[in-house]
Amino acid sequence: MAPKLTNPDEIRDALAKSGGDPVEIEDDQTHTYYVLISRDQFRDMQHKVVRDDDVSDVEMPVRAAW
């Protein structure tokens, strides 16, 4: 079960302890689970799944923010 992290210090601590592994957290109000990874990890994962020229900015809006 993912920890319920309620403040930025707890989140930073969990990320530091993870050794670079993804950190799963649960929003205590919505009970929605999230996985925190670094932007570099996200980009690497995204490029492994989809080549840049295969997806428009509408289909992948996160890319437009880089």
Image: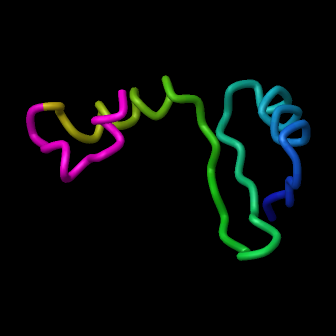
Quadrant in the rendering for residue 8: top right
- Answer whether residue 28 is magenta in the image: no
Q: Measured from the top left, where is residue 14 in percent x and y?
A: 84, 38
Residue at 26% from the left image edge and 47% from the top image edge: 60
Residue at 77% from the left image edge and 33% from the top image edge: 15
* 1, above or below 66, in the image: below
Q: Measured from the top left, where is residue 59 in percent x and y?
A: 20, 52
The range drawn in magenta is 53-66
Residue at 88% from the left image edge and 47% from the top image edge: 7
Name the outermost residue toward the bottom: 30
| Number of numbered tags placed on the structure image | 0
Q: Measured from the top left, where is residue 31 in percent x and y?
A: 73, 75
Q: Nearer the viewer, residue 25 or 66?
A: 66
* 58, above or below 66, in the image: below
Q: Nearer the viewer, residue 34 or 22?
A: 34
* 32, above or below 18, in the image: below
- Answer whether residue 61 is magenta in the image: yes
